[in-house]
Amino acid sequence: MEVSYDPLRATAALENGIFPAGCPSRTVLDHVTSKWGVLVLLALSEREHRWSELRRRADGISEKMLAQTLKTLEQDGLVHRQSQPVIPPRVDYSLTDSGQEVAALLVPLATWAFENAEKILGNRN
Amino acid sequence: MEVSYDPLRATAALENGIFPAGCPSRTVLDHVTSKWGVLVLLALSEREHRWSELRRRADGISEKMLAQTLKTLEQDGLVHRQSQPVIPPRVDYSLTDSGQEVAALLVPLATWAFENAEKILGNRN
DNA sequence: CGGTATCCTAGGAGATACTG
DNA sequence: CAGTATCTCCTAGGATACCG
């Protein structure tokens, strides 16, 4: 996995964009970095998931929050919802192209968290 | 800015690490992706900031949340606090090495949010 | 300036029950 | 199975005041 970003574009984002309260960038950032949003995007970065799979994967999430999170991400055009008209119902969630872009940025973050967790929390003594 | 990550390590993180409720990785991820945590880390990724600078930069943050956020990040060993014994008091916050690592991963995310905000939120009609 | 200490409340979030 | 609907609880977080 490789992420390459133009420093000038990053600077522009930091200087003009991200910090004002209520600005669109922050709204988007909030959705994408939300407690459950991250986990859902990470799960979907691996492969499509059904509702119940996501429910189990994002360990600890309530049905309410899963529904809410998925709805937000779907409205944002990051997650695609495909419902099959069968009995019992089957609904698959996957990433859109935009979704794959963010997810690709989230994965290194998760990897870093995973690899540094012990050290970080170990400081706390 | 360039971020390169071994796919195998990413896979390990996703498969073993990130998802269990209450696991260390998720705690760390929560700190780092918290609403105000992201903004503080982003601000500090540019340069050192004083308390009052951070207060103004992370637009909308309350004193309470700034204090809380900084304390968490400092305990996590991501932010370094340097207080000068002068009058009036002066305190500078900067990133530790670990802090720079995460911040480097956060910047592309912020850049992406900044560049895609309009499109994303435009979907909502 | 760089913070605590206190109080207070909106809404984030869980539990439970129900439905197409 | 894949969700709503409701009810309730609790705490993240804002406002205000004060302090070294």
Image (cartoon, coloured by chain):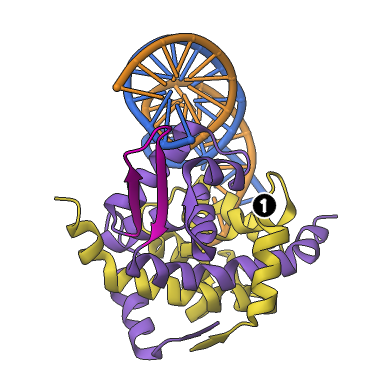
Chain colours: A yellow, B purple, C blue, D orange
Q: Is residue A37 magenta?
A: no
Q: Is residue A56 above or below residue A27?
A: below
Location of residue B83 by image quarter: top left
Please give the chain letter of the residue carrying mark 1. A
| Residue A51 visible in the displayed image | no
Residue extending furthest front?
B87
Q: Is residue A106 visible?
A: yes
- The residue depicted at 61 percent of the width and 78 percent of the height is A100
Question: Mark 1 — residue?
Answer: A27
Query: Badge 1, how many Cα within 10 Å: few under 14, some, many 20+?
Result: some
**Mark 1: amino acid:** Thr
Foreground pick, B85 / A20: B85
Q: Relative to residue A38, is residue B71 depicted above or below?
A: above
**Residue B60, how many percent across, how many down?**
62, 38
Residue range highlighted in magenta? B78-95
Residue C17 lies left or right of residue B125; in this view the side is left
Q: Which of B49 and D6 is in front in this view?
A: B49
**What residue is shown at x 48% (from left), y 72% (from top)?**
B105
Q: Is residue A96 above or below residue B48?
A: below
